[in-house]
Amino acid sequence: MSVGGAEDDIPQGERKIVTDFCYLLDKSKQLFNGLRDLPQYGQKQWQSYFGRTFDVYTKLWKFQQQHRQVLDNRYGLKRWQIGEIASKIGQLYYHYYLRTSESSYLNEAFSFYSAIRQRSYYSQVNKEDRPELVVKKLRYYARFIVVCLLLNKMDVVKELVKELSDEIEDYTRRFNTEDQLEWNLVLQEVSTFIDADPLMILNDANDIEITSNRLGEGGSPPLEHGMIVGQLILADALIIGNCNNQVKFSELTVDMFRMLQTLEREPTALAPQLSKPGLQDPTEKSTKRENPHKYLLYKPTFSQLYSFLSTSFKELPANSVLLVYLSATGVLPTGRSEYEGPYDFGGVLTNSNRDVLNGDAVHKRSQSYKEMHCLHPGDLYPFTRKPLFIIVDSSNSIAYKNFGNLFGQPLVCLISPTTYPKALQDQSQRGSLFTLFLYNPLMAFLFICGLSSMRKGLWDKCQEYLRRINRDIAQLLTHSRTVDQAFLQFFGDEFLRLLITRFIFCSSTLRLHKNFRETGNYPETYPQLPKEEIVENPHLQRHILELASMMDVQNYFQENNIDDY
């Protein structure tokens, strides 16, 4: 405690303020540090602990606001310490978002992180000869960038990256530290990440327009009145990223980032923000429809993946669906066997402590055993006892076409192409084309037609036409007499309906495109969708050609097998 005179001269009231502040500060640190000991999976054990942590931080934040002058004079409270409290609150909201998948909490995290920057809480850190304080500032920037990426605030991201670059340069010049390369790698990762999208949308002033790809009002094709579909709800999703060379930032690959947003609604503010950020207790229940709960697993081992799968399966409510999204390097099968079962087609890579071979597919040297660090189709069989929706984006995705529905529960698997034309293979580090179609089908459509920019007005017209195509796809599916009932059982959920219609649009588009001529270039499904009635439906193909003609790229598509208007 720093004092202006002798300690005895401090009035008792002011001394109590300092004592109470120290107690709240210590308590808050203790609770915050305990967050890392909470189980990573399971949705119930951690909520009361988060509630207590939020409660203490609420009191601490309000306390330092009410008694700032006394704490300045008697405690020697520095601005970077206030920034640390605000940063911890931002982290709390971000971690609550990760636990609940409720994207509104990202807005709250942004509010606190933004206040730190606007009020220059960390501005004096660089004047102190303490490298650990500068590292706190750099970590704050990295966390703020992640939140802004998830909120699609790309203008802010670019400003933060420039500021972070300057801070890293200053840090490495002043302190001869061993983590210089690590921070430069962080900078390189985020710079590559923000350039991953293959298309720019330009307004009249030639500025880049940022569009959101979360589910908005009317974003999913509506169901016709009286149409009978399943009432299942997507409740849980595992998003797994394990591609060897894909761009990533903060344990989030481009594919994971895109699927994460595809499975979320547009965030709304929890409460109006006052002139100073105030704490909203996130443990209070929201009345609106929730996002599906998500686990984000970057390069998990088989044990980790199975633990998360088992927990999600165990906690899945009645009439609910578990979604498993796999974006991973393919593991090819090891030779032929007389009986071809669910462990004889290979699968997708799970992480291990050993180095993997370079290249997209991993080949096992010994032919006598199955690959151990691999998620085989058979590994998912136990979880088909409940409704299961699988998306596999991999060079060996075709292994999952050999599923068997053992228990009669709704089961669908969307399977990516296994190969792409050479020009697109070179772009695979920036994310998979298949996932891009599920995330932003119009951007994917433009990408395969060689376009890298588009005017906002034309983009909006094409998006409106694409919504019409999605409505027609939904009607094709629900009116079909031959489509497998599993698709219809999942069709009542908005997110799954959107994924299925985007998949069909992707499949139909690639089959018409002149550059996609090999069988491995096309996505597949288990169970199979009717080709003539849906995937290669002439009415849908005409729609796709009309969309291409709106962009003047119809020369990329085959027209000879479609009747003229």
Image (cartoon, helix red, strand yellow):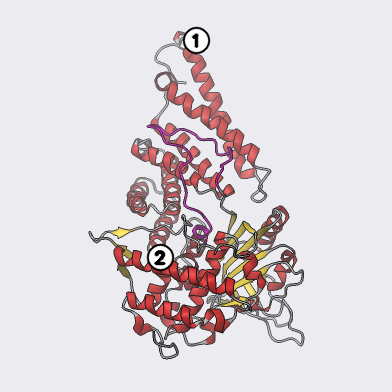
Using the image, determine if residue 270 lies above or below residue 179: above
Front residue (pair 328, 499) = 499
Upstream in the sequence, badge 1 or badge 2?
A: 1
Distance CA(mark 1)–CA(mark 2): 59 Å
Q: Is residue 341 left or right of residue 68?
A: right
Amino acid type of the residue tagged 1 in the rendering: Gln
Amino acid type of the residue tagged 2 in the rendering: Ala
Total marks shown come to 2
Disc sitting over residue 12 in the figure: 1
Majority secondary structure of magenta residues: loop
Task: Give the quadrant of residue 200.
Answer: bottom left
Magenta segment: 259-288
Instruction: State the residue position of label 2.
Output: 196
Dot 1 falls on a residue whose secondary structure is helix
Q: Residue 380: percent from the left, percent from the top? A: 70, 68
Task: Give the quadrant of residue 357.
Answer: bottom right
